[in-house]
């Protein structure tokens, strides 16, 4: 990044500014079966400027902001013109005044830049090591590995840099028999490569695929407990986590209050959620959030009761939080029962939805079932089709969590979650 | 007025041509796509306001595509000195060589493909627009949106807020090969009203949008919709849950669009044929819908947010008839997949931005209209729902399952709307059964281009989709 940007910002007359400079090297590999379809390299720099303008109207104080990306090849004249425009635009934005982040926390030691070639090599070898056969195999996969160096400099004196790896793998698994061929889709995010975890998860997905070949249609079950044991459970926990976000609270979308229960007591387990500064191999282990606030461990919900809101600076200030931040990682504590104990009685365990969703505002739950296991005592039926629906407003207080936990990139959550009393639309009848 | 082509891209074009020439001696195929797209996004509500210059398509950067010995490789970058193109050529070559070394070390096989053809083509197209985003009076726009937001909140006793968002992008792209020089410039815009209402702890959203390959003047059309959408959002506060089951349904044009997009659009993206991921490959020439079903896909037949002159591989825009009178005729295809399948590309090779790979993607996907009125259609329903408002959908090309999450259903009994509203609606089913059940179509059709379309759970691009009101049978939950 050119130094003239800082000089121009200091001379601009802005009441505050921030520069985010993100340099990425990315390696990508695309495979059809195990034959390389395409390889790609990305070498980019993205510089984002944010300008703040304080002003008063009718006795009210405001702090407006405007932001834009500036090309790393921009000339000084281009930068000057852009900064002038942003300053004008910031003056149009009548957000109530708030104080910008000040430097806080010690600068973390700068780690070495991740070795994208080494990480990519680990992914390539991990995918080749997956056990396949004619009945279940990898259809295609895409590997993305990035080395990220992100620096944030602000007018208040913040100058912090995070260096970290960020990876993503998309895997499509097929299974087939004499009658049909099916596919299952998985997307894995992480810091670097967890080769053993990736291999195990892809092979588990193949087992699901073999089961889908013998799936019958989901019956119309009416009300039924649904068990989640894949990353779809994140949607259930995100409902509660999102509602503790200062932005949701300030805008009235969340009615959570500190010291009060986050869900009506319906006999379920009591939820405890923590923000975690780091989680092993998470791609969100930065020491600072995107506005330069230091990230730390913090309890958000304890025993089903709201304890601390979190969020970006503007909304945090509006609801009276002085030193809040936007966490990168979340931990949901386990419950009293084991996964095996939660998998008892009659329940539908859905391991593949087309796109399971929980609306953070309304709490509405919706997802088409692509593969499920309908348990009734010792009887198990493999099913597909139909849908799960309901609302967290009514069902959120009846969730049950397993003791065991499982990590999905920047979330550590109970390995098994039981949603009691959801509505199941059958695939026929 | 014509949307003027980027002076920046014009300025770097000679250097980029030198870059292409430098690489041509080392590879069997070379192209470069250069982008310089600017715009703004304003978001105004009673509680928070923001303005920035990032939209889904704002970007400045370049991507080189090369092929050697049947392997296609790409190098994406956004630092370029037009006076030293050989330096960038060397950096690209060095970066790709490092990958080749790893591929050799890991004994990776290659899916070999012939070199893409490079027929000569010069095309410089600046498309019509009303105004330009970079010349927009943002002060006036912010005031206008603020006034609409205030009107929205005043219109409902249950209003928490009324968000207005407005985005406009001036897209400029340049595609160069040794024999091609293609440049295009156009403007698209989209605006949304998002009311938030609450009652007794229940929070619901509404949604109404405008979109088009037009300039920021399009946002004036939001004004007439504010009070209506606030009242519409209020309906959800007292909506019941639907009794799950199969119903006669009439879907609104935006839901028709969602069905077109999710049910069939993704299913005939032919890069999925190459991977054997789409059931559609086995159904070419076969019946997949009722006689009433004819569906178009392409960047040329409609003027909407995804209407361009050429795609990100330099293939001119097409109008592809995918389904004609219920028979699946063909899919849509990017250039590389077309080469692999032995078919012609259809101008559907799109990238999220210069940093992303090309996939086969939809542009404007639309069902043809019929000859009924909405009133005639409602009169034929014994017991069912008029379905409106799309929230989301998900494709399933391999199995032709469908998931559409919809805002609401208005109950119809004995040919009349009863006034009862149910929400939300999860519509699921098997695509040929759903399309096969279509029995009536309305005379008009509309297209909608707000938001974005992903492939799987990533690769977001602009698309539009739509159709007429359609009567069908569907499973609702």
Image (cartoon, coloured by chain):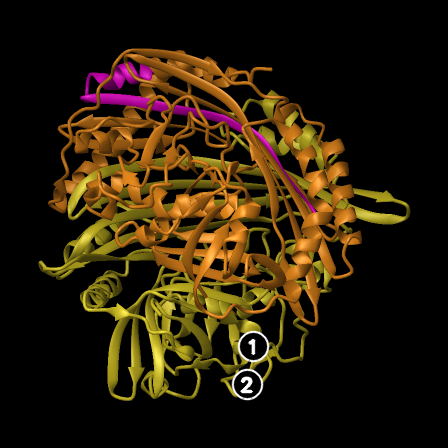
Mark 1 crowdedness (10 Å alpha carbons): few <14, some 14-19, many ≥20:
some
Determine whether, in the image, residue A312 is placed left or right of residue B367. right
Residue A130 lies left or right of residue B424; in this view the side is left
Name the residue carrying label 2. Answer: A266
Q: Would you say residue B36 sits in the magenta stretch? A: yes
Q: Does residue A166 lie above or below B468 as drawn?
A: below
Location of residue B147 with respect to B156 vertically, above or below = above
Q: Is residue A113 visible from the viewing direction of this image?
A: no
The residue located at (50%, 31%) in the rendering is B304
For the residues labelled 1 and 2, say whether their Cβ atoms are less than 8 Å apart. yes
* Circle on res. A214: none
Q: Earlier in the sequence, mark 1 or mark 2?
A: 2
Question: Residue beneath label 1, please?
Answer: A394
Q: Position of residue A280 (x, y in %)?
A: 37, 65
Within-10-Å neighbours for mark 2: few <14, some 14–19, many 20+: few
Query: At x 68% / y 39%, what residue is drawn?
Result: B222
Name the foreground residue: B315 vs A383.
A383
- The quarter of the displayed image where residue B286 is located: top left
The chain under label 1 reads A
Report whether mark 1 lies on the same chain as mark 2: yes
- Dot 2: element: loop
Looking at this view, name the residue that lies furthest to the right. A58
- Chain shown in yellow: A
């Amino acid at each position: 990044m050119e130094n003239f940007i800082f000089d121009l910002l200091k001379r601009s007359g802005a009441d505050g500014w921030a520069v985010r400079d993100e340099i990425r090297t990315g390696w990508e590999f695309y495979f059809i079966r195990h034959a390389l379809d395409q390889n790609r390299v990305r070498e980019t720099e993205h510089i984002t400027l944010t300008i703040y303008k304080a002003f008063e109207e009718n006795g009210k104080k405001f702090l407006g902001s405007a932001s834009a990306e500036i090309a790393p090849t921009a000339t000084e004249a281009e930068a000057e013109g852009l900064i002038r425009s942003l300053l004008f635009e910031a003056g149009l934005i009548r957000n109530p005044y708030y104080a910008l982040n000040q430097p806080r926390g010690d600068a973390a030691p700068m780690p070495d830049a991740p070795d994208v070639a080494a990480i990519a090599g680990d992914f390539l070898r991990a995918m080749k090591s997956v056990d396949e056969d004619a009945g279940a195999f990898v259809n295609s996969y895409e590997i993305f590995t990035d080395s990220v160096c992100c620096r944030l400099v602000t007018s208040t004196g913040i100058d912090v840099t995070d260096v970290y790896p960020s990876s993503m793998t998309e895997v499509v698994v097929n299974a087939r028999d004499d009658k049909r061929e099916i596919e299952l889709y998985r997307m894995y995010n992480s810091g670097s490569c967890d080769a053993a975890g990736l291999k195990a998860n892809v092979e588990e997905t193949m087992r699901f695929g073999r089961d889908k070949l013998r799936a019958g249609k989901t019956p119309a079950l009416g009300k039924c407990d649904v068990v989640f044991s894949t990353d779809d459970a994140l949607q259930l926990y995100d409902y509660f986590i999102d509602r503790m976000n200062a932005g949701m609270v300030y805008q009235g979308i969340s009615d959570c209050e500190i010291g009060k229960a986050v869900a009506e007591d319906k006999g379920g387990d009591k939820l405890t959620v923590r923000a975690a500064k780091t989680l092993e191999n998470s791609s969100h282990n930065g020491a600072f959030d995107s506005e330069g606030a230091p990230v730390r461990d913090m309890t958000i919900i304890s025993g089903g009761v709201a304890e601390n809101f979190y969020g970006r600076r503007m909304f945090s200030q509006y609801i009276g939080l002085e030193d809040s931040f936007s966490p990168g990682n979340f931990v949901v504590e386990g419950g009293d029962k084991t996964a095996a104990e939660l998998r008892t009685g009659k329940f539908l365990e859905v391991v593949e939805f087309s796109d399971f969703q929980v609306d953070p505002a309304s709490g509405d739950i919706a997802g088409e079932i692509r593969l499920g296991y309908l348990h009734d005592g010792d009887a198990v039926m493999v099913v597909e089709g139909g849908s799960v629906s309901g609302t967290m407003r009514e069902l959120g207080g009846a969730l049950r969590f397993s003791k065991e936990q499982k990590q999905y990139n920047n979330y550590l959550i109970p390995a098994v979650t039981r949603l009691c009393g959801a509505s199941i639309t059958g695939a026929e009848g | 007025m014509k949307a003027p082509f980027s002076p920046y891209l014009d300025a770097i074009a000679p250097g980029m041509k030198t870059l292409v020439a430098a690489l041509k001696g080392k590879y069997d195929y070379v192209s470069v796509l250069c982008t310089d797209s600017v715009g703004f996004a304003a978001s105004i509500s009673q509680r928070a306001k923001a303005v920035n210059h990032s939209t889904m398509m704002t970007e400045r950067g370049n991507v080189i595509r090369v092929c050697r010995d049947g392997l296609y490789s790409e190098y994406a970058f956004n630092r370029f000195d037009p006076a030293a193109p050989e330096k960038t050529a060397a950096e690209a070559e060095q970066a790709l060589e490092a990958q080749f070394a790893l591929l050799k070390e890991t004994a990776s096989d290659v899916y070999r493909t012939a070199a893409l053809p490079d027929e000569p083509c010069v095309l410089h197209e600046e498309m019509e627009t009303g105004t330009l985003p970079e010349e927009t009076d943002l002060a006036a726009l912010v005031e206008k949106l603020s006034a609409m937001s205030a009107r929205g909140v005043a219109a409902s006793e249950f209003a928490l807020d009324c968000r207005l968002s407005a985005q406009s992008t001036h897209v400029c792209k340049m595609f160069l090969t040794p024999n091609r020089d293609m440049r295009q410039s156009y403007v698209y815009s989209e605006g949304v009203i998002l009311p938030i209402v609450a009652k007794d702890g229940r929070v619901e959203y509404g949604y109404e949008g405008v979109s088009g390959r037009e300039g920021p003047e399009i946002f004036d059309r939001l004004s007439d919709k504010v009070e209506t959408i606030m009242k519409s959002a209020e309906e959800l506060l007292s909506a019941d849950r639907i009794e799950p089951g199969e119903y006669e349904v009439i879907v609104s044009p935006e839901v028709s669009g969602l069905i077109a997009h999710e049910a069939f659009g993704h299913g005939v993206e032919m890069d999925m044929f190459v991977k054997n991921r789409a059931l559609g490959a086995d159904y070419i020439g076969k019946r997949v819908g009722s006689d009433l079903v004819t569906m178009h896909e392409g960047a040329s037949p409609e003027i909407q947010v995804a209407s361009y002159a050429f795609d990100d591989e330099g293939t001119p825009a097409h109008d592809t008839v995918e389904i004609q009178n219920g028979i699946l005729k063909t899919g849509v295809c990017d250039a590389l997949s077309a080469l692999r399948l032995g078919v012609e590309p259809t101008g559907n090779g799109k990238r999220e931005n210069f940093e992303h790979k090309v996939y086969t993607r939809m542009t404007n996907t639309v069902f043809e209209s019929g000859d009924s009125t909405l009133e005639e259609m409602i009169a034929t329903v014994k017991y069912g729902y008029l379905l409106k408002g799309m929230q989301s959908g998900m494709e399933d090309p391999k199995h032709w399952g469908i998931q559409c999450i919809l805002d609401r259903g208005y109950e119809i009994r004995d040919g009349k709307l009863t006034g009862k509203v149910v929400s939300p609606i999860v519509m699921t089913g098997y695509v040929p059964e759903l399309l096969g059940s279509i029995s009536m179509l309305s005379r008009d059709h509309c297209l909608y281009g707000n938001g974005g379309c992903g492939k799987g759970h990533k690769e977001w691009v602009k698309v539009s989709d739509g159709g007429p009101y359609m009567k069908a049978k569907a499973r609702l939950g």
